[in-house]
Amino acid sequence: MRMAFIKTLIKLAQKDKRIYLLTGDVGFSVAEEFIEKFPERFFNCGLAEQNMVGIAAGLALSGKKPYVYTIVPFVILRCLEHIRNNIAYQNLDVKIVLTGAGFTYGHLGVTHYAIEDLGAMRSLPNFTILCPADPVETEKLTLKSYKTQNPTFMRLSKAGEKIIHNPDVKIEIGKPIVLNRGKDGVIISSGIFVRTGKEIVEKLKEKGYNFKLLSLPTLKPINEKALFKEIKEKKLIFSLEEHNLIGGLGSALSEILMKKNWKGKLKTIGIGDFYPRETGEADYLREKYIFQKEKLIKEILKSLKK
Amino acid sequence: MNYERISKEIRRKVIEIMYKSQTAHLSGCLSYVDVLVFLYFKILKIDPKKPFNENRDRFLLSKGHAVASLYAVLAKKGFFSGKILNSYCQNGGLPGHSTIGFVPGIEISTGSLGHGLSLGAGMALAGKRDKKKYRVFVLMSDGECEEGSTWEAGLFAAHHKLDNLVGVVDYNKLQAFGRIKNVLNLEPLAKKWKSFGWEVKEIDGHNFFQIEKAFSRIPFKKGKPSLVIAHTVKGKGVSFIEDRMEWHYKNLTKEQYELALKELE
């Protein structure tokens, strides 16, 4: 994902001199091409993330289009008030693109996990929040968000994510993407679990059930009409996310479905309200602390029989 | 130009609007008036008729709680009508912290301390990249030199040789709940900034001769950001407010209001 982002950004920066890239002492094996092509528009701000957020705001107030790139918690959690006062409140065109969604940095431990960031950011007015599922979504959302002047937080995993979409898939900020159609229920996800959702939907098909699969890469603002159109007829929805169940996709869906007076069963699947004790590979942690695919399939089948 | 006369007028105006609104932060508003007046009436290249001119000097009030003085100066300069000052801290009126979008001339929204210098450094950086001549002035409180982010910005500005950036510390020695030296000592403050790569001048922030001398040549040194440590008295100009912690919070009674105005005649 991060390469999809940086390659797209380089293309944009070739045409748009307002684009600046700021990092907090990260970018090894990612940012080099940008640095080589635009040395005047790259700043490694060092381990001083609060200042980096302020520098981005100052650049945006001076007509630039700054991109801040580092690891999720070091900006979102460490600098939340700086983001709030200087970017959200002043409604500045700053794009914050961060890696390490959920358990991506599995071995590095809780300090590196991004499991509360969406809850924090969803409560900031003016911000657009994007959680792409694969390099295709990353590229398209980088392009779409570039065209807006909105403060934007794009939450990436890291590298090696499987491509889910066809290159010509249509993606709009705010709207869900339909990956599979089916009448028996809906699986909806943002980020890395869209991939797993796809596998689950295929397994369910083998058992004779057809589930609709939605990727919702925008967590804010969600086009509620477009989303509800896709799910209103369904009575069973499973949401999958790599975040604390408080504040992310499941919360957003609950808010919308309650408001729309939807009658059905929504099962939100994410991380419980605790700090995982173990560290390990991301997929190990996902299985241990969020869900195991086979168990979830059984649970879905059980729900269908009820 | 008679800066002392203008300063007195601004202080009177600040006292008037803060008496009307019965809101806090009076003493921190009074301490930096002289520096503010000199910057606006002598140093800053600004045109009240073109407040968004790309080439304007920028003045950022990082200690946003002291915005009443800035409003008074902006009105006096003609950025907006003096009548608007009457809405200071009234419901729906001018906010009690520096806030964009209410009157022209306010460059950034502040209120939480330790943010302004980073924004100023970002603007100065953009100016350098665009080869513009504008300068960015950031007025900070002494208290906010306790914020780590201020020093992050200090490192950044020196590292990138932002000699179009001028920091001013309103060093009145009092913070919200105690004397700086007792709460979290900043000394030796000038040495700290120097060691961070800034060119530093220390002045009596109420002495126009010294203020003029300090700001007469910017940058102080080519290739370095400039810093003025203005030694000031919190509450300057009104004897019973000067150097007393409680006036960070207190509101004037009618008698105090009249007495304060008399002292500033």
Image (spheres, rainbow, N blue to C red):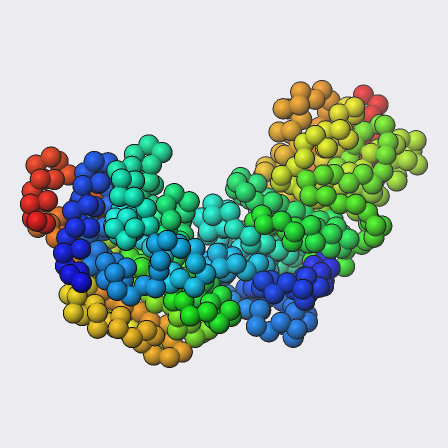
Residue furthest out toward the bottom: B222
Between residues B102 and B167, which one lies in front from this camera angle?
B102
Closer to us: A20 or B159: A20
| Percent position of residue B164, x then y | 39, 70
Number of dots carrying numbers:
0
Residue B184 shows up from this direction: no
Left or right: where does residue B123 sit relative to residue B172? right
Out of B154 and A278, give the one closest to the viewer: B154
Q: Is residue B46 left or right of residue A161?
A: left
In the displayed structure image, the side of residue B205 where residue A101 appears, left or right: right
User: Residue A173, located in which quarter of the rendered image?
Assistant: top right
> Considering only vertical position in the picture, is A149 above or below B88?
below
Where is residue B114 shown, x and y percent of the image? 37, 56
Q: Is residue B161 above or below residue B181?
A: below
The relative height of residue B83 versus residue B98 in the rendered view (above or below) is above
In the image, taking residue A61 as reference, residue B95 lies left or right, namely: left
- For image coordinates 33% across by 50% down, the residue present is B79
Residue B186: x and y in percent read 27, 64
Residue at x-position 76% and y-position 59%: A160
Image quarter of the N terminus of chain A = bottom right
> From this viewpoint, is residue A154 visible?
yes
Q: How far across and down, in percent of the image, does residue B25 sit?
A: 24, 45
Going 64% across and 24% down the picture, which residue do you hit?
A258
Which part of the image, by quadrant, shows the C terminus of chain A?
Answer: top right
Residue lying farthest front? B49
Where on the picture, by quarter, is residue B236? bottom left
**To which quarter of the image does residue A298 belong?**
top right
